[in-house]
Image (spheres, rainbow, N blue to C red):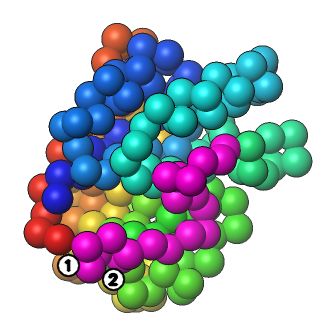
Amino acid sequence: MNIWITTDLHFKKSQFEFLVENQDKYDILTINGDLLNQRIDFEKQTKWINSLFRKIKKPVFICSGNHDLDAEMEFNWLYGDNLILDNKIKTINGIKFGVVPFMGADFSKFYDCDILLYHIPPKNTKTATLKTGMDLGCDEVYQALKHKIIKPKYLLCGHLHTTLSKEDTINQTKIINPNAKPNAQDPLVYELNIKG
């Protein structure tokens, strides 16, 4: 199974269109937050994104990011039969995916997932450390992994666009942050091929 992992598209239309045009190259798409840019033109952005996602016929897992919340700090503007969003768990070909929300995350709900999406990478990892050496990772997800509250095979993140590495490991969990280039024509995509 070929999984395309991307993040932080920040309403760059050409990057969304690339994902639609190339859907024959992946079985599953994950977007690890920050679909929107700013809350300016919120309705215009959300309407366009919803329209575009109707063209994707594959399963799309999306976790909310800090740019995706509405004025009430909720992520309820995205919809579609093929979309698996915050607080959802879905098994495909024996692989259990979980989507952790940006706000109000209860990691224990996802204790037995194989693949987790969460917007911010865990602290103390190269996936959360900028090239300047500044660590901007999340302590909460770090503690959940360290103390084995969650034990996914893969944790898919985003939020930070240029980190020391796209991969790191805590215990047996491989952490993947594909990084992002919001001003580029095409998104950065990390391909994960797993049996399932």
Kindly identify the residue that appears in the image at 23 percent across and 44 percent down.
Answer: 26
Q: Quadrant of the N terminus?
A: bottom left
- Disc 2: which residue: 151
Figure quadrant of residue 164: top left
Amino acid found under the numbered disc labelled 1: Gln
Of 163 and 82, the residue lying toward us: 82
Kindly identify the residue that appears in the image at 64 percent across and 23 percent down.
Answer: 48
Expressed as whole percent of the image width and height from the top left, the position of residue 173 reads 25, 73
**Seen in the image, is 196 located left or right of residue 91?**
left
Other-residue count near label 2 (Cα within 10 Å), few / some / many at <14 / 14–19 / ≥20? many
Q: Secondary structure at mark 2?
A: loop
Based on the picture, tell me whether residue 91 belongs to the magenta stretch.
yes
Expressed as whole percent of the image width and height from the top left, the position of residue 180 reads 36, 30
Mark 1 → mark 2, Cα distance in angstroms: 7 Å
Residue 30 at least partly seen? no
Expressed as whole percent of the image width and height from the top left, the position of residue 20 reads 38, 28
- The range drawn in magenta is 78-96
Other-residue count near label 1 (Cα within 10 Å), few / some / many at <14 / 14–19 / ≥20? few
Kindly identify the residue that appears in the image at 37 percent across and 48 percent down.
Answer: 58
Question: Is 97 above or below relative to 64?
Answer: below
Figure quadrant of residue 90: bottom left
Q: Which mark is residue 172?
A: 1
